[in-house]
Amino acid sequence: MVVGNYPSWSRILRQVGRPLCVFFAVAVLVTLLEKRSHPFRAIPAPDITFSLLAAALGVLLGFRTNSAYSRWWEARQLWGRLVNSSRSLARQAVSFTADSGRQIEASPFARTLIRSQIAYAHALRCTLRNQAPWEDIERFVDADTVAVLKEQQNVPAALLHRMGQCIANAADSGIITEWRLQRMDIVLSELTDVQGGCERIKNTPMPRQYDQYPELFVMLYCLLLPTVLVQELGWLTPPVTVLGSFVLLVLNRIGKNLENPFENQVYDTPISALSRTIEINLLQALGEEQVPLPAQPVDGVLW
């Protein structure tokens, strides 16, 4: 996620620089044809036609950008729920198993469950970004559990299942009461809902019509734009064409950049920073003193 106060022009030009060069060359060619007597002299297009096309194109780009932002914002909300549910589970694991009249201290059951939840957050992040999660998971669960997880297709779901078994075993052993078992199971269900929402966004891309048609219409509009401007602007047609094309291309790229929030790109939801937040909060709930530092932006980007 970009968090800098100023745009990175190098990043912007990498995305729209090539088509801008093409549109500039076309505008120069149209201007030359207009200024010279030539059988292929540019035929000016009517202004009213392009005004109507521009209005329709603006509505289309706005609708597409809003749809893409809705996906990005939903992803951020889901991970906000994951952070809160992780904190709730850690609080319940510690407080539900603490001895009355004594200072609250994490029991072995709480330590196992909370460290599994940290592993779950990292596993979900890596799964959504198509990365191997084992380096992060191995820091929080034992080798036997890692060996079992490597045989699973859905590692986060498998971790949730093992966490549910851990809570059920604690209830069977009398470590927690049935009522407390139910409260903790509600949190696990919330985690399941969050994972399902993330997987839905990940596995259901924007309809291809939303991606292909706006880009096609923007390209056609920018290619034909010089034919409208050339009679009035003359040699100013190329720079004005570049300016107008830049605005449309950037608007189109905003939608493309936001529509897939789990691809480990610059404009993604910052799930690496959020999973680090979960790790810090839960380790401190266990009373750990050695905790990592919060994630910091790198070159204006928070991952």
Image (tube, helix red, strand yellow):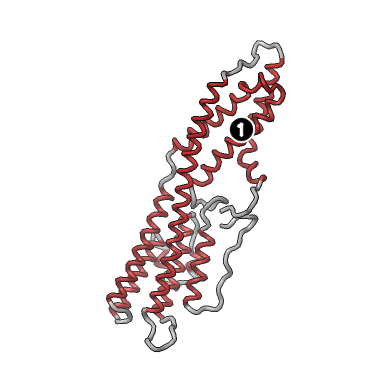
Which quarter of the figure is the C terminus placed in? bottom right
Q: Secondary structure at mark 1?
A: helix
Type of amino acid under label 1: Ser
Q: Residue at x 62, y 32 (%)?
A: 244
What x and y, as percent, mark residue 140? 47, 72
Relative horizontal placement of residue 42, taking residue 207 as reference (left or right): right
Q: Nearer the viewer, residue 229 or 277?
A: 229
Q: Is residue 24 visible?
A: yes
Count residues near mark 1 (Cα–Cα under 10 Å), then give few for <14, some for 14-19, many for 20+.
many
Image location of residue 77, percent across then percent down: 45, 56
Q: Position of residue 69 (x, y in %)?
A: 48, 47
Which residue is at the front of the view, 60 or 37? 60
Q: Residue at (65%, 50%) from the top-left corner?
A: 6
**Does residue 293 appear left or right of residue 139 in this picture?**
right
Whole-percent x, y for residue 47 in the image = 57, 21
Task: Please state which of residues 89 and 4 is positioned toward the viewer in this rendering.
Answer: 4
- The residue that disc 1 covers is 245
Q: Residue at x 50, y 63 (%)?
A: 275
